[in-house]
Image (tube, grey):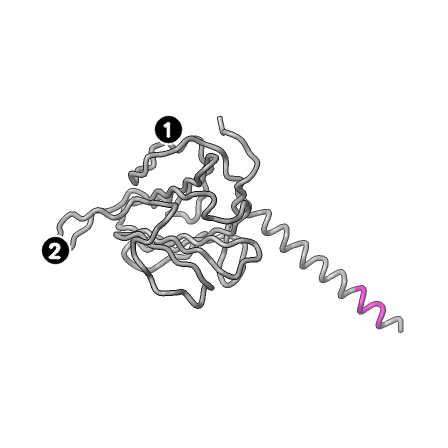
Amino acid sequence: MIKQTVFILLGSVFLFRFVGSSTDRREAFSVQVPMGKHILIDGKVDEKEWADAKQIQASPATSLYFKRDNAYLYLAVKPSTPARLSIDLYFRGSEAEKVLDLHASAKLGEREGPLDRWPSWVWWNNRGWTANVVRPDSFEERNFLPDEAKEFQIELGKLKAKTLRFSLDIDTGGEVQRLPQEGYEEVGRKWLVLRLVGGSHRK
C-alpha cells in the first residue's frame, strides 16, 4: 500500500512538472504583437516604417517583424541577403486541428486543412490579405528579380483568434527551411505564440 501511494505521488509530481514545463515553454516563445502604423506593401522593410514593430530573429539569416492596428496584422519576413522568396505562413488556434496557410511567391494563394492533408492550391483566391509578389525581370526567359523582403497585411478577423500559433516555411531557391528554429513544439513543427490583444503603441 505504501509503495502504491509513493508511485502515485511520484507520478503526480512528474505530470505537474511536464504540464508546467510545457506552459513555460509556450510563454518563452510568446510574442506580444504591438500596435503600430500601417505600412506600404512594397517588399522593402524601411527602418522608419517598421520602427514600431516587434522584431524576432527566426534564424541567423531571417528576421521577422510583427505589428498590428485595429483591423490588420502586419508581418514582414526579411532574409539577410535578397533572394527570390517563396513563403508559406501558418496560423492555428490553440485547439484548432485545421491550419491556415497563406502562400506568397510569384503567386498568392491560401488553403486551410490539417498539416498532413492539405487541399489542392487554388491560386489568387486570397481574401482579406495581401503580400508583395516576386517581380519578373524577363517573361521570355522566366527570370525573376530577388526580393528584399516579403510584407503581409492580414485582416485580424481572418485569423479567427486573438492568440495564435505561428510558423513559416521559406524557400530562397534551394532547400525549404522551417522557421522559427527555436520555438514551442506542437504537431511536428516549432511555433511562436502570437498575442493580438493588449499592448499599446511602441515609442
Expressed as whole percent of the image width and height from the top left, the position of residue 80 reads: 33, 44
Q: The N terminus appears in which quarter of the rendering?
A: bottom right
Expressed as whole percent of the image width and height from the top left, the position of residue 9 reads: 81, 64
Q: Real-space Cα distance between discs 1 and 2?
A: 36 Å
Residue under label 2, please give it. Answer: 141
- On whether residue 94 falls in the magenta region, the answer is no
Q: Give the mark nearer the N terminus: 1 vs 2.
A: 1
Residue at left offset 57%, top offset 57%: 95
Pick out the residue farthest to the top. Answer: 203
- How many other residues sit within 10 Å of disc 2, few (<14), some (14-19) or many (≥20)? few
- On whether residue 7 falls in the magenta region, the answer is yes
Span of residues in magenta:
4-9
Q: The residue under label 1 is which amino acid type? A: Lys
Residue under label 1, please give it. Answer: 48
Residue 53 occupies which quadrant of the picture?
A: top left
The prevailing secondary structure element of the residues shown in magenta is helix
Residue at left offset 55%, top offset 34%: 199
- How many other residues sit within 10 Å of disc 1, few (<14), some (14-19) or many (≥20)? few
Q: The residue under label 2 is which amino acid type? A: Glu
